[in-house]
Image (cartoon, rainbow, N blue to C red):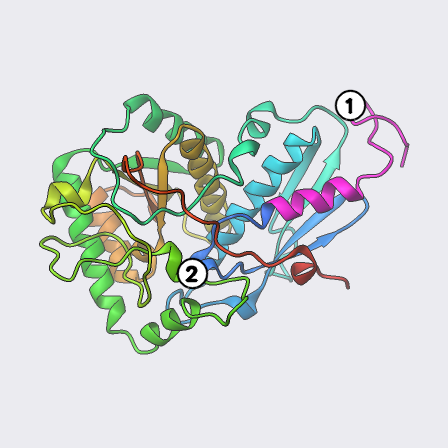
């Protein structure tokens, strides 16, 4: 390979440091229960993304949809990190039909990086999953449009449940889906496993990042209930307006419902979360809404009434005025996720 610049017709002489650093940035992507279900292979001019099936949650995520969405979010984070390093790339998704765990190959190519992708890079370290109550301050419509445009660029559609009737149907569907899941055999044990990791662990959901749900809640909440919660939040009354605040519920949908669509939905999720974070908004991916076939059908046919397929619900809103900065959730280091053969 010619040892020339990144631009024009050649590539840089040594990409290994940039590729390794970009993969390290991609490890900050959100994933279901912070399972981080990905493995990576770094070559001379490319990176491969592989699913780590050993981190699949069979009771929470029976069809591996959450796992694929999580890997799609990591793929988008990688693309952002490479663009920030002024690297143009080509992405082949699901490149090998005989190896379904090989999700993408990202190859560095001559040319200019995508400046819109690079602009999202500074907030990779800032983004958090914020499960606390949010401010009553409404989210401006122009920010909702910007998030929708970002999702569209990644091959998905973002539907805002802003109409009161749609919002009511969505919240009711989320609550029913949560009740159905809570009585499923194995679900509670699986949730406890990933929220009570061993000391010094680098995955799972720490109790310090989860606020306790009030025991006398007057209205259903769209948020998943975790068995361990130590995060404090400002006291508020427990009526529907206080629970909801000014947060918006957005549903990511795709035209089809195959593994490639789940991967694309994950890329769109990352784009929406980073865009919202850059605007100063708090964000919460709500994967529980799509983890049972009943709740997915209800979202599609009774709530949204669309032909597209729901893949994820995202809650966005302004942080509460007295909300403290959230600590980062743990991540495995690069050496723990690299494939060497």
Count the marks: 2
The spot of residue 77 in percent (x, y) is: 56, 42
Would residue 154 be found to the left or right of residue 293 on screen? right
Q: Residue at x 36, y 76 (%)?
A: 189
Q: Quadrant of residue 293?
A: bottom left
Q: Does the segment drawn in magenta span residue 6?
A: yes
Marks 1 and 2, how far apart in space? Answer: 41 Å
Q: Secondary structure at mark 2?
A: loop
Q: Residue furthest bottom?
A: 185
Question: 100 or 85: nearer the eye?
Answer: 85
Camera-near label (1 vs 2) is 2
The spot of residue 306 in percent (x, y) is: 26, 41
Q: Which residue is mark 1?
A: 7
Q: Residue at x 70, y 44 (%)?
A: 21
In the rendered image, the quadrant that contains the N terminus is top right
The spot of residue 278 in percent (x, y) is: 45, 30
Q: Residues within 10 Å of mark 1 (few under 14, many from 20)?
A: some
Which label sits on residue 118? Answer: none
Q: Mark 1 or 2 closer to N-term?
A: 1
The residue range painted magenta reads 1-25
Q: Can I make out residue 211 in this image?
A: yes
Q: Which residue is mark 2?
A: 205
Q: Does the segment drawn in magenta span residue 294?
A: no
The spot of residue 133 in percent (x, y) is: 25, 45
Q: Can I make out residue 65 in this image?
A: no
Q: Secondary structure at mark 1?
A: loop
Question: 264 or 117: nearer the eye?
Answer: 117
Q: Residue at x 70, y 59 (%)?
A: 335
Q: Quadrant of residue 97?
A: bottom right
């Amino acid at each position: 390979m010619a040892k020339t610049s990144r631009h024009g017709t050649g590539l840089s002489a040594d990409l290994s440091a940039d590729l390794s650093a970009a993969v390290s940035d991609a490890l900050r992507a959100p994933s279901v229960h912070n399972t981080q279900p990905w493995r990576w292979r770094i070559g001379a001019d490319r990176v491969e993304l592989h699913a780590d099936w050993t981190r699949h949650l069979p009771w929470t995520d029976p069809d591996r949809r959450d796992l694929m969405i999580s890997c799609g979010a990591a793929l988008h984070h990688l693309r952002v990190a490479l663009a920030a390093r002024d690297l143009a790339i080509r992405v082949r998704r699901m490149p090998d039909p005989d190896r379904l765990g090989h999700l993408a190959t990202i190859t560095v190519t001559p040319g200019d990086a995508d400046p819109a992708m690079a602009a999202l890079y500074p907030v990779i370290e800032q983004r958090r999953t914020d499960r606390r109550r949010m401010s009553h301050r409404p989210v401006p419509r122009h920010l909702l449009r910007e998030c929708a445009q970002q999702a569209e660029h990644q091959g998905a559609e973002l539907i805002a449940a802003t109409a009161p009737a749609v919002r009511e149907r969505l919240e009711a569907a989320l609550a029913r889906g949560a009740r159905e899941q809570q009585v499923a055999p194995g679900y509670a044990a699986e949730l406890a496993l990933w929220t009570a990791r061993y000391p010094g662990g680098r995955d799972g959901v720490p109790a310090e990042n989860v606020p306790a749900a009030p025991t006398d809640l007057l209205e259903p909440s769209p948020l998943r209930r975790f068995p361990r919660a130590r995060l404090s939040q400002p006291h508020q009354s427990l009526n529907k307006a206080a629970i909801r605040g000014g947060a918006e519920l957005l549903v990511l949908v795709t035209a089809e419902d195959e593994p490639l669509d789940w991967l694309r939905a994950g890329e769109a999720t990352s784009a929406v979360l980073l865009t919202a974070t850059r605007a100063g908004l708090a964000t919460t991916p709500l994967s529980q809404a799509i983890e049972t076939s009943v709740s997915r059908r209800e979202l599609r046919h009774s709530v949204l009434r669309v032909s597209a397929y729901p893949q994820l619900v995202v809650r966005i809103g302004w942080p509460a005025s007295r909300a403290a900065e959230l600590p980062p959730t743990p991540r495995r280091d690069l050496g723990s996720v690299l494939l060497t053969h």
